[in-house]
Amino acid sequence: MPQTDYVGSLAASTRATLEIIGLVSVVILVILASVPDLREPVGRIGSGMWAAITDRVLEPAAADDADAGDADGPRIGQPVTLDVRETNEAQYLARRYRVADEAVRVMVAAAHAAGREHQVDPLLILAVMAVESSMNPFAQSPVGATGLMQVMPGVHAGKFLDRSGDFGPLDPIANIRVGSEILGDVIRRGGSVERGLQLYVGAGNLSDDGGYANRVLGEMGRLKMAASGGVAAALAAGLRSDTHGPGEGGDSLGVAPTELRASSSAKPHAA
């Protein structure tokens, strides 16, 4: 008999034996419980047995489920726990870009997780998301940049294949993870956040990034203001920025990133 068959048969036999022992034990307890003098001690024994079962079986199972959820990270549609600063960031982004609060909370959680993983300021990640897509996970530019952080799928397809499967660039969490990895790479390559943002938008070989870095850094500044409790002030600053336009610190999505990617000879978002 092959070893695997033997092990399977042994496991099945053991399980059947334990089931029989358990059934016999229950029958004995029921019989003993019918004797008045033994009812109370038998009840205590039964309670102790049930407590042991729940402690050793049910609680570890619940812990396993929780661990599995943590391993997968935040997911759209699932509740997340944010601290006060992160909650303020989510409120600002939800109101500024008119996106559902629950969805933005997950995006904020994912940005902070990606920031820790790739050593990038999570507020910078959120600012890039805001400028690139206005927090729309299904945004796509004419040149194919896709999702929250406008990742180029043709250039970075392989980055979506790790962890638990192929999540593609339209999966919000996968897009944040991959976009943050790219952002961290170009910042390290460029030597500064400003230069990294120029590389990220595809303006590495151009003399001007069209104000892209300023828009991202301006939105990052408003996110810092919101995180510190000034959500209303940050929203007001964003409105003033939109009114004055990108040339005076505006951070609305506009067309600059798309135009830069279309005109640049370098690969957009090159890793």
Image (spheres, rainbow, N blue to C red):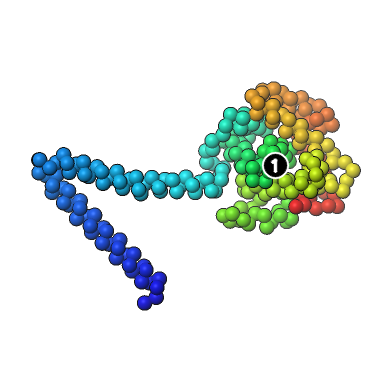
Location of residue 155 in the rendering, given as x and y in whole percent from the top left corner: 74, 55
Q: What secondary structure is marked by label 1?
A: loop
Location of residue 131 in the rendering, given as x and y in whole percent from the top left corner: 74, 38
Location of residue 100 in the rendering, given as x and y in whole percent from the top left corner: 60, 34
Q: Residue at x 77, y 45 (%)?
A: 187
The reply, left or right, for residue 126 in relation to residue 34 is: right
Q: Quadrant of residue 194?
A: top right
Q: Up-down: is 98 above or below 148?
A: above
The reply, left or right, for residue 199 in relation to residue 10 is: right
Q: Residue furthest left?
A: 36
Q: Is residue 236 visible?
A: yes
Q: Is residue 107 visible?
A: no
Q: Quadrant of residue 83?
A: top right
Q: Residue at x 66, y 23 (%)?
A: 230
Pick whichever, 258 or 114, lies toward us.
114
Location of residue 243 in the rendering, given as x and y in whole percent from the top left corner: 78, 26
Q: Residue furthest bottom?
A: 1
Q: Which residue is mark 1?
A: 120
Q: Residue at x 9, y 44 (%)?
A: 35
Q: Up-down: is 199 above or below 254?
A: below
Task: Characterize the local packing of mark 1: few (<14), some (14-19) or many (20 or more) Cα atoms within 10 angstroms.
Answer: many
Pick whichever, 105 or 135, lies toward us.
105
Q: Quadrant of residue 43?
A: top left
